[in-house]
Image (tube, grey):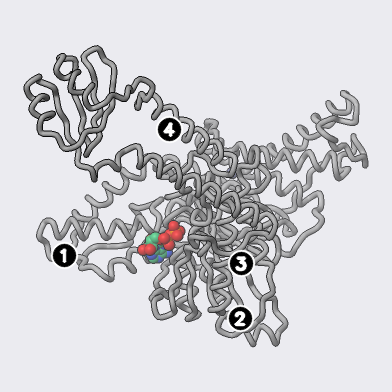
Amino acid sequence: MKRFNRSVFPSKGPKGIVLALTIALAGIGVLSWLISDTREINNVTYSQFLDLIEENKVEKVHVTGQDVQGKLKDGSRFETVVVDSPQMWDMLRAHNVMVAVDNLANQFNFWHLLFLGSLILFFIFVWQFIRQARSASSGGGPGGIFNMGKSKARMFPPSAIKEKFSSVAGVHEAKEELQDVVDFLKNPDKYKSMGAKIPRGVLLVGEPGNGKTLLARAVAGEANCPFFSISGSDFIEVFVGVGASRVRDLFEQARSHAPCIVFIDEIDAVGRHRGRGMGGGHDEREQTLNQLLTEMDGFLTYKKPVIVLAATNRSDVLDKALLRPGRFDRIVHVPYPDQKSREQILQVHSQSVKLDPTIDLAKVARATSGFSGADLANLINEAAINASKAGKTMIDVHDLEEAHDKILIGKVSKSKMLTDEDKRVTAYHEAGHALIRLLMPLDSDPLHKVTIIPRGHALGVTSFLPEREKYTSSKDEMISSIMAALGGRAAEELIFNKLMTGAASDFRAATAIARSMVCDYGMSEKLGPVVYSQEYGQQPYSESTARLIDEEVRRILDECQVKVREMLSQHKDKLDKLAQLLIEKETVYAGEVYELLGIEPRTELKLS
Ligand code: ADP
Ligand code: ZN
């Protein structure tokens, strides 16, 4: 992935350029002074020159047209001018002087080039300086002398977009969410009459190769509208102000083609949170980001909306301002495909090749856990290459296996691949979280889905959907959350009887909840209804209170842990079943879990 263009100057920003230019020009000066050695050249007359030859003092001469430069045997240099003189040539030969002759036209030499080069550099520098001054006073004028500001975006008219939702296999949730955008683009009037908000930005989050670009194009395909595509790194250039003016140009173009989709890949290249740079080197990126925010906040009509879809695999580094309402207020996850989705993706991609009909794609899907959509497309493609190299008419199992191994070797280094053992441990860990939730009283958040497909840094995820937007939590709910967090490690312990390292973030979450119960919500009788929060890293309470807080937090966690261990060993059969299902299917939705376990999510539970 290309990140930044750093072609001309070693450092971005005006200070870097000034420094680089000064050093370059100084270097050129010193170098030419050292090499050309103009200090010692003596001018001699033509007759003196002839005398020198006669006296055998001349070692070599360099003749360029009428100019003669020469070196004496004592090392000193001289220069003279001659008129066409056959006598001179004879003498040079007779006295064995080395002679080099240059055509007049070649006089335009290296030094001239260097001079010209520095001149050009100088003008670029001046131009940039003027530009900057202008952009500082006017917020950046569009375009530039060389049209540096013209956006690098590519526009695809509807006729050029072949992708539809049917081209994207799996990712049902993502498609469902994006269907809204399609509906809106197709039927803005319906939204208007309902007074519904115009969707503006959707952030697609997922590891590379899982179909974010594909989905964005499919949205345009479904809505039959133009598609503008650009990568975040294309905004970032050496020259300050260019990125911002590219953003402006892009949106100008997009608005004139509205309704349309603008797709920004790798948005993290511009969207990292601001104010983290050292010494202003990030001006360019910040200006670009500000411009993007301005454009997204701009006036929109129902008739001519521009909807921005952006992709990233690093939503954690994005500036929070990007995620505010009216900007990228919807986040759609595009995870690694689960087994069923992998089978469907394989199906989509094998339509364009000849596959041995006895091949069981479900089996291939089972063997490709951790493959992205792009890996699967690549798998089919490599297999097709293998088959045609071997002169076969169809792709057979061996071709697929060979391709599989090749891709796997490439992936293992980047390893997000789970070994079978990892997969088992992760399955039990996530099953532990989920089962505890299911066994808790009704008022805790219901289970949404469990997955052991790695996402970002996590090996697995168990997610719960709050039923309603909640502003307060009851003590029971907080206890439930702590217990669910502890359920992962407890399940591992119960089954594998050894400690693993994968639960650190769970403990952190559990501890944070327990601490806020004690310090913020007055839920500990020992400490009472007092807020014990730390201010500026200092604790405004005594050491003994601090110890008491720690003890209380510890007590809550310990009690929860005992309870969790008890519950899991009591329901070990359910834990086994759920883990087994996870190993098999990788992603399991709440409905399936209830059905499998035959439990009502209700168990009265009392903690002191
Ligand atoms: P991203 O933008 O997330 O990096 P892409 O959309 O560029 O990923 O995906 C790369 C390629 O992988 C696609 O062009 C397509 O061939 C294949 N692919 C990825 N996900 C899917 C999917 N869900 N269904 C079908 N093909 C997919
Ligand atoms: Zn966990």
The residue indicated by pointer 4 is: 28
Q: Are marks 2 and 1 in contact (CB under 8 Å)?
A: no
Q: Secondary structure at mark 3?
A: strand
Nearer the observer, 219 or 512: 219
**Res 403 visible:** yes
Q: Secondary structure at mark 4?
A: helix
Looking at the image, tell me whether mark 2 or mark 1 is earlier in sequence order: 2
In front: label 3 or label 1:
3
| Amino acid beneath label 4 | Ile
Task: Give percent across and percent down for residue 237.
Answer: 51, 51
Q: Quadrant of ligand 2?
A: top right
| Amino acid beneath label 1 | Met
At x 18%, y 23%, the residue is: 50
The residue indicated by pointer 2 is: 304
- Residue 394: assigned label: 1
- Left or right: where does residue 400 sit relative to residue 199? left
Nearer the observer, 307 or 540: 307
Q: Are marks 2 and 4 in contact (CB under 8 Å)?
A: no
| Amino acid beneath label 2 | Lys
Answer with the quarter of the image where residue 189 lies.
bottom right
- Residue 360: assigned label: none
At x 43%, y 32%, the residue is: 28
Q: Secondary structure at mark 1?
A: loop
Task: Give percent across and percent down for residue 425.
Answer: 49, 41
The residue indicated by pointer 3 is: 201
Q: Mark 2 vs ligand 1: CB under 8 Å?
A: no
Q: Residue furthest top?
A: 74
Looking at the image, tell me whether mark 3 or mark 2 is earlier in sequence order: 3
